Amino acid sequence: MFILQVATWMMPRRFLSLLLLLPLVVTAAECPYESYATDGAILVADTTYCLSTAPVCAVDTSCRRLLSHKISRDQVKFSGYSALGNLTAYPHDELYIGNASYVNANAMELPSTLLTLSFDNVTAISLGVVYSDLIDNITELYSLRPLTSTWSYALLT
C-alpha cells in the first residue's frame, strides 16, 4: 500500500475529497503460472520476467525470478526444470529439456524460430492441448529415454 502525502493547503477542498476517494492499493500483475502445482522452477524466456542481458530465466509460481542464465549459441540444454512457460523470446532454434521426473508444458509458448524441441530423460510430460500453430515451425520433436509418455493426438497426426 502506498502512502500519499498531500499539501492540502494548495488544493481546493472539492479536489481533495475526490482524491481521497481513489483507491491507493496497487497490485502486481497476475502470474500466469499461479495454478501450476509445482515447487520447482519454471523455464521462461519472457521479457516481462527475464533480464535483457539474460533472456532465459527461471521463475516460481509467483513469477519471482529464481536464477538467470546467460546463454551462448552452444548453451541450449536445460536440466531439472519442472515446467515450461512463455519461451517466445528464446534466442535459439533448438531447445533441449532434460533430467526431470515431470515437466508441465501445458502453457508452453514457443518462438517461431524454434525448429528442434527435445525432451531427454523426462519421466512424464504434460502437454495439455497442443495447438498446431504452437508447433508449426518445429521440424524435429524428440522424446529420448522416456519412462512414460503419453503423446497428444494432435502430435500423432
Image (spheres, helix red, strand yellow):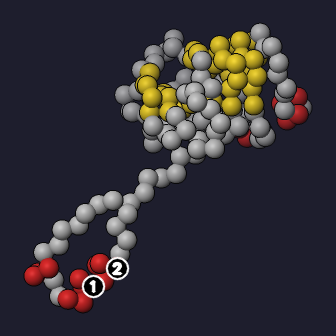
Question: Which residue is rendered at x = 29% and y = 60% of the image?
Answer: 2
Instruction: State the image coordinates of residue 68 (x, y, percent, origin top left).
Output: 43, 25
Q: Nearer the viewer, residue 69 or 64?
A: 64
Would you identify the image quadrant in which residue 17 lies? bottom left
Q: Callout 1, which amino acid?
A: Ser
Question: Which residue is rendered at x = 28% and y = 78% of the image?
Answer: 19
Separation (CA) of disc 1 from disc 2:
7 Å
Q: Callout 2, which amino acid?
A: Leu
Badge number at residue 17: 1
Quadrant (top left, top right, bottom left, bottom right) of the N terminus:
bottom left
Disc 2 secondary structure class: helix
Contact? badges 1 and 2 (CB < 8 Å): yes
Q: Is 18 on the left or on the right of 157, as rendered?
A: left
Disc 1 secondary structure class: helix
Does residue 35 lie above or below 102 as drawn? below
Q: Is 111 on the left or on the right of 3, as rendered?
A: right
Q: Is 79 on the left or on the right of 13, as rendered?
A: right
Instruction: State the image coordinates of residue 84 (x, y, percent, origin top left).
Output: 62, 31
Question: Which residue is rendered at x = 30% and y = 83% of the image?
Answer: 18
Would you identify the image quadrant in which residue 16 lies? bottom left
Q: Nearer the viewer, residue 60 or 131?
A: 60
Residue 21 seen from this side:
yes
Badge number at residue 102: none
Q: Which residue is mark 2?
A: 21
Q: Residues within 10 Å of mark 1 (few under 14, many from 20)?
A: few
Instruction: State the image coordinates of residue 132 (x, y, percent, origin top left).
Output: 78, 39
Q: Nearer the viewer, residue 147 or 84?
A: 147
Q: Is 130 on the left or on the right of 82, as rendered?
A: right
Does residue 49 lie above or below 11 as drawn? above
Quadrant (top left, top right, bottom left, bottom right) of the C terminus:
top right
Question: Which residue is rendered at x = 75% and y = 26% of the image?
Answer: 125
Would you identify the image quadrant in which residue 20 lies? bottom left
